Image (cartoon, rainbow, N blue to C red):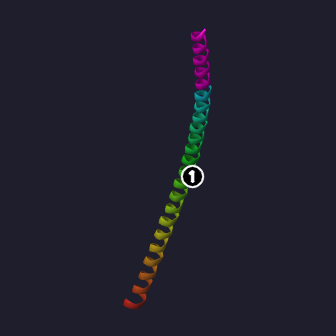
């Protein structure tokens, strides 16, 4: 009878450990899925920011080119007016 009781206790302990490990496993999977979702969201935000930076860079480049043209025209007009 003692062996039967020991076996029952062992089976109960194994079942309790299984339940605990199953819950821990589910929690870990949930945490991993949340982390993956956050990674995806952050990656999307990163791509959006990179696009925004590229747009600003293009705008600034365009403005610099326009300013250089204006400065060139102004310098040419100054040269023609005062050196000719």
Residue 50 location, x and y as percent?
A: 51, 54
Residue hosting label 1: 48
Position of 35 relative to 71 (above/below): above
Position of 36 relative to 80 (above/below): above
Can residue 80 be seen? yes
Which residue occupies 57% across, 51% down? 45
Q: Which residue is at the front of the view, 46 or 74?
A: 46
Q: Main secondary structure of the magenta part?
A: helix
Which residue occupies 47% across, 65% down? 61
The quarter in which the C terminus is drawn is bottom left
Which residue occupies 50% across, 65% down? 62
Looking at this view, name the residue that lies furthest to the bottom.
82
Magenta segment:
1-18
Can residue 84 be seen? no
Q: In the image, is residue 26 part of the stretch drawn in magenta? A: no
Q: 10 Å neighbourhood of mark 1: few (<14), some, or many (≥20)?
A: few
Residue 32 location, x and y as percent?
A: 56, 37
The quarter in which the N terminus is drawn is top right
Q: Which residue is at the front of the view, 69 or 21?
A: 21
Q: Which residue is at the front of the view, 57 or 28?
A: 28
Is residue 9 rendered to the left or right of residue 81? Answer: right
Which residue occupies 59% across, 37% down? 33
Residue 27 location, x and y as percent?
A: 61, 35
Is residue 27 rendered to the left or right of residue 66? Answer: right
Task: Indicate the quadrant where residue 31 lies.
Answer: top right
Residue 40 location, x and y as percent?
A: 57, 43
Position of 37 relative to 13 (above/below): below
Q: Mark 1 falls on what kind of element?
A: helix
Q: Which residue is at the front of the view, 77 or 43?
A: 43
């Amino acid at each position: 009878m003692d062996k039967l009781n020991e076996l029952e206790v062992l089976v109960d302990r194994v079942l309790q450990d299984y339940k605990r490990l199953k819950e821990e496993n589910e929690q870990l999977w949930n945490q991993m899925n949340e982390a993956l979702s956050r990674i995806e969201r952050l990656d999307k935000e990163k791509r959006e920011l990179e696009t925004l930076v590229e747009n600003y860079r293009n705008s600034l480049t365009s403005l610099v080119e326009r300013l250089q043209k204006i400065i060139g025209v102004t310098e040419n007009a100054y040269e023609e007016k005062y050196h000719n």
